């Protein structure tokens, strides 16, 4: 292999290396910034094949898509009515000017730090003018919109465009939530005691009314029973009187038989009477003539 051929191959190799270092591709989801010795030279925002000076210029790629910023921790905010809330906000943004973005924040990590500070400050200012009621109602959308407008105006100088800012969570701090829970629990327990006391009072009234009604019903029943019993006894006496009045001797005989059955009907009955007693007058004379 001659020197000329070797030289030609070397030249072709250098050209290939130069072309490889001079060509670069920008994807559809990217935008690029060409730097020369660390100084920005031009911005490329259209996808395709591009050229740069090999060994002299470098390329820095930035996302063209929408990026999300989600803070790690919630922030405590004091509202205008002195209520405290734990607020967790997130934002979506785009890099609108790669050159300005490079000059101000350099990369996404630097942009994150600046954005978090700006969003936190805007959220505190916006919510500091609002009350808890306005945040919990339909005004919340207007509040987040105003926060987005304020943040967008602040980050325009960073080459960033804010797409949206939202409040993911707005809750009471843990201590406040516990106090509210304890207060609600105490209130419910107080209401339960009132309901129980009212129920017990109503139960006592119902029991008293029932007992009163029971006493009245029993008294009325006993009175009617006595009246009925008295009327029955009177009617029985009248019937007995009429019946026995029709035959006085039979009535005397019947009463004596009843007396014998009641007095001597039980076993082991002992009686000490004179045999000539009038009690035994029907034993020797069926007509009941007096014994002599």
Image (cartoon, helix red, strand yellow):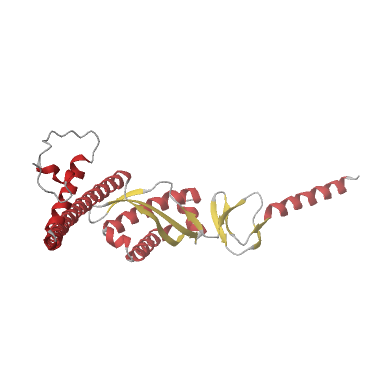
* Image quadrant in which you'd find residue 153: bottom left
Please state, as top left, top right, bottom left or bottom right, where the N terminus lies in the image: top right
Residue 87 lies, in percent from the top left, at: 36, 52
Please state, as top left, top right, bottom left or bottom right, where the C terminus lies in the image: top left
- From the viewer's perspective, tell me whether residue 94 is left or right of residue 146: right
- From the viewer's perspective, tell me whether residue 210 is left or right of residue 96: left
Residue shown at 47% from the left, 59% from the top: 93
Residue shown at 47% from the left, 57% from the top: 100
Residue shown at 87% from the left, 45% from the top: 3
Between residues 204 and 105, which one lies in front from this camera angle? 204
Q: Residue furthest front?
A: 292
* Image quadrant in which you'd find residue 220: bottom left
Between residues 258 and 85, which one lies in front from this camera angle? 258
Between residues 75 and 3, which one lies in front from this camera angle? 75
Residue 46, above or below 192 = below
Residue 6 lies, in percent from the top left, at: 85, 46
Residue 274 lies, in percent from the top left, at: 10, 35
- From the viewer's perspective, tell me whether residue 264 is left or right of residue 59: left
């Amino acid at each position: 292999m001659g020197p000329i051929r070797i030289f030609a191959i070397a030249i072709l190799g250098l050209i290939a290396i130069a072309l490889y270092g001079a060509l670069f591709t920008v994807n559809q989801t990217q935008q690029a910034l060409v730097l020369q010795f660390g100084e920005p030279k031009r911005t490329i925002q259209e996808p395709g094949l591009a050229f740069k000076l090999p060994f002299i210029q470098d390329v820095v790629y930035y996302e063209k898509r929408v990026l999300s910023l989600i803070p790690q921790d919630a922030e405590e905010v004091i509202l205008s009515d002195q209520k405290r809330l734990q607020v967790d906000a997130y934002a979506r943004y785009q890099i609108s000017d790669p050159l300005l973005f490079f000059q101000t924040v350099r990369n996404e990590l630097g942009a994150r730090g600046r954005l978090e500070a700006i969003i936190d400050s805007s959220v505190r200012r916006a919510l500091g003018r609002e009350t808890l009621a306005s945040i919990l109602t339909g005004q919340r959308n207007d509040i987040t919109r105003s926060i987005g407008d304020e943040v967008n105006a602040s980050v325009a100088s960073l080459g960033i465009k804010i797409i949206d800012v939202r409040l993911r969570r707005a809750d009471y701090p843990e201590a406040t939530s516990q106090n509210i829970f304890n207060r609600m629990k105490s209130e419910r327990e107080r209401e339960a005691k009132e309901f129980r006391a009212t129920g017990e009072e109503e139960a006592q009234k119902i029991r008293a009314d029932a007992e009163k009604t029971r006493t009245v019903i029993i008294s009325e029943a006993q009175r009617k029973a006595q009246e009925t019993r008295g009327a029955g006894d009177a009617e029985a006496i009248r019937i007995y009187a009429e019946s026995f009045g029709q035959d006085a001797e039979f009535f005397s005989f019947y009463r004596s038989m009843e007396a014998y059955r009641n007095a001597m009907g039980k076993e082991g009955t002992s009686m000490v009477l004179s045999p000539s007693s009038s009690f035994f007058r029907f034993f020797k004379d069926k007509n009941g003539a007096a014994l002599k």
